[in-house]
Structure formats: structure tokens, C-alpha cells
Image: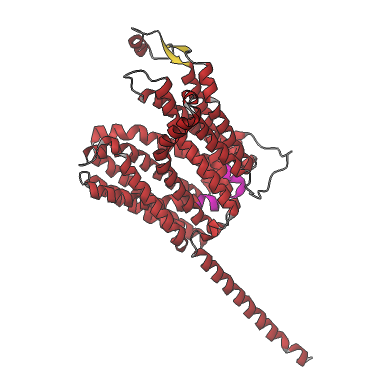
Amino acid sequence: MQLSSDPKPDQSQATKSSDSQSMERQRRRRKTSSNQGFAPVLRNVRFLTLWGGQIFSQLADKFYLVLMISLIATHYQGVNQSISGWVSAIMIANTIPAVLVGSLAGVYVDRWPKKEVLVVSNILRGLLVLSVPPLIWVFRGSTLSIPLLWLPSALRRWYSQSHEAFNLPVGFLILLGITFLVSTLTQFFAPAEQSALPLIVKRRYLLPANSLNTLTTMAVLIVGFAIGEPLLGFVDRLVGTKAGTWDLGKVLVVGGFYITAGLILTALQTREKLQPDDTQYPHVFEDIKDGVRYLQENHKVRNAMIQLIILFSVFAALSVLAVRMAEILPGLKASQFGFLLAACGVGMAISAISIGYWGEKFSNTTLSFWGALGMAAALGGLSIATKNLPVTFALSTILGMFAGLVGVPMQTTLQADTPQEMRGKVFGLENNAVNIALSLPLAVAGVAETQFGLQPVLLSLASLALMGSVFSWYTAGRNLMDKS
């Protein structure tokens, strides 16, 4: 009996040794995979499918604005008339759904298959754009008189001295309606895309995947507006003069990009666990409250969203202040403010690439802390160097680099720490909050700069970024307390 029992300790020890070796191999594999940067993501066919659809969809979004400006200039802008009022109306029609529909769209994204939302939202947007030429042709020359009863009495008396109503072209009102519908469908696409990413990319690869998405967004933002007008004009000339009077070439490009995005996404395999068809869902507003409660109870996700709101608020204000900065910088004109924003975009692209390769070595809150702190320092530097062109460009690039350290890790935190059944609600609320955060600084920044000057407003933005850094430090402390 004693001889037969002797091997047991040896077997147990061998088993433990084997387990430790297996764990060591797994640790080495994880370490190796985390040092591969974008390679594991780029080998993921499902991610490449989503990425391809995203590129075509985002390019179509940029081309759409170029298309609307071209249509207004061709059909509705009067001689010696400013185009600003027409374009402002289009921008308002594009913004309203983001504020009104964002949260509702997130709720339905949780209830519907993500792939279907991605495909249908793109194809419907493409069909709406393709409907523009026949609708403009049918209603050419028609106007609609809009009574002034809705105006305040003082404004009504002032305007009615020479007018009794606004006479707007019906075709332009159709453009406003189509823009509203296209933007509404975009509110479904955005949370569906964010919700689909964690379904097709493993958790440990979410950081490089989001880095690649951020890099793509920056590239599309710069390239999309740069090539939009030449590309639309070239295709218009290609299809011929008669078709050009219908703007058929421009419309085919924009609508075609949306539909191409939808067709690419038909190949996407999310392997999502779908709810049975007879599932009884609560009222939509109860689902929104459920999302708000989730954010209240999960401070890590809530704090990531707050960090993103601060980030977008700073950049929304900066997009307005960049005009004034370009105006007072030697060697630049006010109309060349885009160079400053492009420098920020280059910085964010550098940051996204760096995070994709080395971001796994740091926690998301650590990256966010240093990112917000760096943003505060760069904004403080910009407030001082308002008349030095090379330093301003360098600081704008540095600002973009540190902004990437906030944006990419915080978006990754939202995706990684939000359960699948809550992602649509959370990303819908994020979409809603970010759009509101974008709107307020756009309205206030210009007025504040006129009233107080450029330097105090930039220092205020630096203080806001510094608050974000302190917030990240506090969040990191809370996380450590929770783990203990």
C-alpha cells in the first residue's frame, strides 16, 4: 500500500508544475499579443469589414455637406447674397436629431440586431441622397410663404415693414427635410457601430482597435473635405453637361458611398446573441432611465463619459477660437484657421498610432490623467504664444497628441466595461451628451472671446482640461479602492 501511494505526491507536484508552465505560456502569449500593436486587429476579418463600412460611411458624411453647399450655391443663393444663412439652416437641421433622437436611437440599437441597423441606416441614407435630383426638379420654381406669426412682436413689426412672410424655395425645404432624415439615421448608425466593435474584437485588442478608428476618423476629416469638392465636380463633368445640371454626378458619389458602406457591412458577422421575437420590452423611456441608472451606479463608465464630454467641449470651443487665433497670427489669415485644426488632427493621429502599439502597458485612467494634464499645459501655452506662428503650430500638434490620450482610452473603457445589453443605451446617451457638449461651446466661445479676449478664454479651457486631469486621478483612486 505504501509503495502504491508514493507516486501520488509526485503526480500532484508534476500537475502543479505543468499548470504553472501553462500559465507562464499564457502570460507570454498575452504579453506578445499586447506588443503586436495593430497586427492582431488587422488580421481580424470581421474588424476589417466594420472598418471598411466605417470609412465609406464617414467619407459620405463629409461629402454630404459639400453636396449641400454646392446645391445651395447652384439653385438657391441669390446674386451678391451671402451663403451663410442657407448653410446655417442646413447645419441646424443636421444637429437637431443628434440632440432629440440620440438617446432613443441607443435604446432601439440594444433591441435590434446591430448588423441590420448598420446596413439599413447606410442604404436608407444613400436612397435619400439619390432622391434629391428628381425632387428638386419636380419643385423647381415653387416657393412656400411662411407666416411671421411665430416671431416675437417686435421682430415681426421690424421685418413686416417690407415683408409679410418668408418666401422659401420648396426645393430648399426638401433639402432641410432630407438632411434631418439623414442625420436621424446617423444617430442609429453611431451607437450600433460602437456596440458592434466589442462583439468582433477581443477585450485585450479594443485599445488598438479604437486607436485605429480614431486614426481613421482624423484622416477622413482631413481628406474628406479636401477631396470632396474636386471629386464631386470631376464626376459631375464625367457624367455630362445635361446630367450636371441635375447635379447627378455629385449625388451619385454621395449616395453611392453610403450604399457601398451598407453593402460592405452585409458581410459583417457579429455573432450577437439575439433576443427571441416575442420578447416583451419595457417602455422606451424606461430603457433610457435604465441607462441613466447604470451610469449613476458604475462610476468608471460614467467618469469615462464625463472625460469625453470635457474633451469634446474643449475642441468645440477651440474650433471657434481658431478663427481668431489665425486672424492675429503673423503669416495667417482668418480663413486659414483650418491649418491650426489640421495640426491638432495630426497630433491625434500620432497619439492614436502610439497608443495602438504601446498603450497596453498603461491603464486607461493613467493615459487619461496625463492626457488631460498635457492638454491643460498646451492650452496654457497657446494663451501665451498667440503671436508666434511656429510655436502655435507646435502647441496645436501637442494638444492633439494629449487629446488622443484622453479620447482613445476613455472610448475603450466605455466599450470594455459596459455589458452587451446596455451598450446601445450607454452609447446613445454618450452620443446625445457629446452633441449637447459640442453645441454649447460653439454658441458661447465666440461671444466670450469678444467680451473677455482670447487669452482668458484659452486659460478657461486649460482650467477645464485640468479639472479633467484631477477627475482622472480621483477615478484611479476610486478604482484602486474598489479592487481592494
Image quadrant in which you'd find residue 168:
top left
Query: Is 417 included in the stretch rendered in magenta?
Result: yes
Q: Which of 481 and 340 is in front in this view?
A: 340
Is residue 283 found left or right of 35 in the rendered image? right
Q: Which residue corresponds to the image point at 21% horizontal and 42% vertical from the top-left? A: 331
Determine the residue positioned at 30% across, 33% down.
446
Image position, residue 4 (x, y; %): 77, 89
Q: Is residue 283 left or right of residue 436?
A: right
Residue 179 seen from this side: yes
Q: Is residue 292 visible?
A: no
Exactly how many numbered labels are in the figure? 0
6 vs 381, nearest the viewer: 381
> Magenta: predominant secondary structure element?
helix
As drawn, 137 above or below 14: above
**Figure colour scheme:** secondary structure
Residue 24: x and y in percent read 57, 74
Q: Where is residue 104 in the image (x, y as percent from the top left)?
A: 57, 34
Q: Is residue 160 left or right of residue 5?
A: left
Which residue is at the far right?
Answer: 1
Q: In which quarter of the image is the N terminus?
A: bottom right
Find the magenta span and give its range.
412-424
Where is residue 293? Give x, y as percent.
55, 43
66 is within the stretch colored magenta: no
